[in-house]
Amino acid sequence: MTTKQLHSLWFNISLLALIFLTAVSLIIAKAPYMHDFAEWVYQAQIIKMFIVDPAAVSQFTMAGYPVPNSLASAILTGLSFLFTPVWAGKVFLILMLLAWYRVISLFTARFVDEQWRAAARLVLYASIALATFFWYGFISYQLALLLLCWFFASYREDTKAFVIAAFAVGIFFSHAIIFLVFGLFLGVRLLLKWNWSVVVGLLPATFLALWFLAGRHLANVEPQRIDASWNGLREMLIYKAGYPAMLGPFKNYLQSDGTSLFENHPWLYWLGFVTNFAVVAALGLLVLVVFWKYLRKDLLDSDEASLLRNSWAISIVLLIIFYVFAPYHFFGVVNAGGRIIVPVLLMAMMLGGNLARLFVKIVVWPVALISLLTVSSYYYLMLQTRHVDFSPVAKSSISIKTSDSVLDFNEKLYAATRYKYFNYRVFAFAGRFEQIESKRFRGLAFRHAMLIKYDAKAK
């Protein structure tokens, strides 16, 4: 066995270990603790009650029009008819882990040569499937991203209208920003060369989008805002420059009391901190080099049609412009610009072909090692939840004034830990599981999915 074959074997084993350890962590945990995810499991139980006992949840209002962020909630609701709420959440996340493996395998099979495919698969899985958004419990965004990656892996110039329509509708019901990315790419492709399959394929989702906008307006639904925002140009620039590093492999999980697992291990924290910036800097350089080579017409080894390569390149530019100028609050979506980083990375790899090989080889070892450290620490934390005296709910809550900046918000949010960055409050919203168990449904943390209103006086 050659050195390259040994490396590929190790990368494949590392990837399977990441998936297995993450799945086992979810299985052994008292509940699927993953930041926002508890809220989505909670809302799925309310939607289920609308089906089996509407009077019990009469204080809640469901949208009477199609809404993005609905597909994940619908799947969770369906799983809740087969499993307990806790296990419905666990099964959903494990299915996502497995689906990501399949989709990334399809993506690399098309865009990556076999010699470095194992390394690319590992880097993409750690950077996308196990990215910040997964640990934050952004399941609608992750589901939309999964569908977009699958679409990129399968779309060609002769793709049929019904296939485009299926992806378009699925992505629309998953997440609005990824739907905009999807529409932008196909819009650019149409401007470069007219195609009736694309036009017809986009019609159903376009109709749904217009229905959503009209229904939202008629229902007088105000975009939901969190309490923080950028305080001036300087803070905006700091945030936009640093945010991509969140896609690095290092995650610092916080315990229910607000302290971190690496509180007394500064060398591990700072190793992970530096690794995140180094990995994302390398991937960012990949995007720039690929685009530079494209402008110089040096990307001649690609088997992809010139129409697709031109569409990817133009889309990358437009998405980067969107990232630079997108406000912190964008029609109810917090940090919408941050949601287009992964699509830009995917299109850069699609456009670059073998040019991406060097950058993947540079980051694959630190990504593999730090990702294993990250998932192992999550396993350790979930193991603690099995103790009889464990409580996931913090004893005191944090109150943030609306005038606070994002950076001040961050400082106060992580006041209990010595480290302020790359933190993940996996036990946020953990109290929802207690409410689910007691069937005491009170309030909505998020109102941008199928449930849009709560009125405590209605019941």
Image: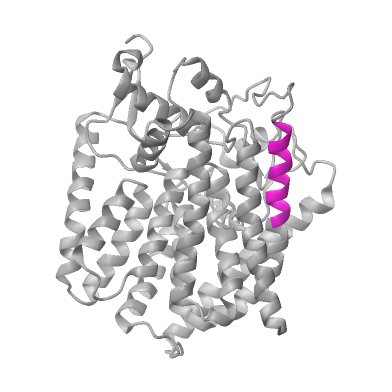
- Magenta: main secondary structure: helix
Q: Position of residue 235 (x, y in %)?
A: 57, 48
From the viewer's perspective, is residue 338 above or below residue 446?
below
Residue range highlighted in magenta: 372-385
The residue shown at (45%, 65%) is: 344
Q: State whether residue 420 appears in this view.
A: no
Q: Position of residue 123 (x, y in %)?
A: 60, 66
- Is residue 383 a member of the stretch shown in magenta? yes
Q: Nearer the viewer, residue 80 or 160?
A: 80
Quarter occupied by the C terminus: top left
- Is residue 434 a member of the stretch shown in magenta? no
From the viewer's perspective, is residue 432 above or below residue 458?
below
Q: Position of residue 120 (x, y in %)?
A: 57, 71
Q: Nearer the viewer, residue 37 or 225?
A: 37
* Image mark count: 0
Q: Name the image quarter holding residue 277.
A: bottom right
The residue shown at (61%, 72%) is: 119
Q: Nearer the viewer, residue 379 or 172?
A: 379
Q: Name the image quarter holding residue 321.
A: bottom left
